[in-house]
Image (cartoon, grey):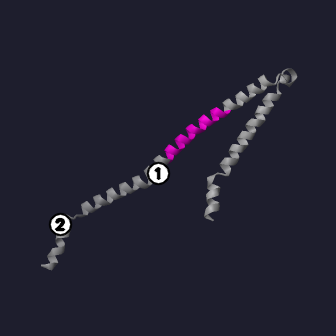
Amino acid sequence: MKNKSWRRFLRGASLQRDIGELRDLLVRYVKEETIKPLKDLGRFLLWGAIGSVFVAFGAALLLLGSLRYLQWQFPVLDGSLSWLPYVIVAALSLVVIGLTAWRIVSGTAKRRLKVSE
């Protein structure tokens, strides 16, 4: 009698059902651990690229505005010195590029490394 009592738990159990459950578990795991992080990474990259385009466009407009301001505000730079505002704006753009590169290189990853050490 005791020998047959444990068999009721196995009623309906089959290798096919176990394989189906294993396949479902594997599919859920793959979706959770690979597809979802890839979608999140894609979303992060998309918004980062869109933001970069807008920031670059804004920086270009600010540099163009500063060039026009220099040409308008300082009439002494007309004539033989008309090239000087362009050099000033080019140097300003190199400073902006340098600051941007510096912030990228010394970003949060290095700060996290220092904290965890």
Tell me, yes or no, whether the highlighted magenta stretch contains residue 51: yes
Is 57 located above or below residue 33 in the figure? above
Tell me, yes or no, whether the highlighted magenta stretch contains residue 10: no
Residue position marked by numbered label 1 in the rendering: 37
Q: Disc 1 residue type?
A: Pro
Residue farthest to the front, as pictured = 73
Q: In the depicted view, which residue is nearer to us: 70 or 44?
A: 70
> Residue drawn 63% across and 32% down?
57
- Residue 17 point in image, percent of width and height: 25, 60
- Looking at the rendering, the stretch of residues picked out in magenta corresponds to 41-59
- Residue 107 point in image, percent of width and height: 64, 51
Q: Which mark is residue 60?
A: none
Q: Quadrant of residue 50?
A: top right
> Residue drawn 59% across and 34% down?
54
Q: Quadrant of residue 67?
A: top right
- Most common secondary structure along the magenta stretch: helix
Is 16 located above or below residue 89 in the figure? below
Q: Is residue 6 left or right of residue 72?
A: left
Which tag is nearer the camera, tag 2 or tag 1? 1
Q: Which mark is residue 11?
A: 2
- Residue 52 point in image, percent of width and height: 60, 38
Q: Quadrant of residue 117?
A: bottom right
Q: Disc 2 residue type?
A: Arg
Q: Secondary structure at mark 1?
A: helix
Q: Is residue 82 left or right of residue 61?
A: right
Q: Is residue 39 left or right of residue 57?
A: left
Q: CA distance from mark 2 to mark 1?
A: 39 Å
Q: Secondary structure at mark 2?
A: loop
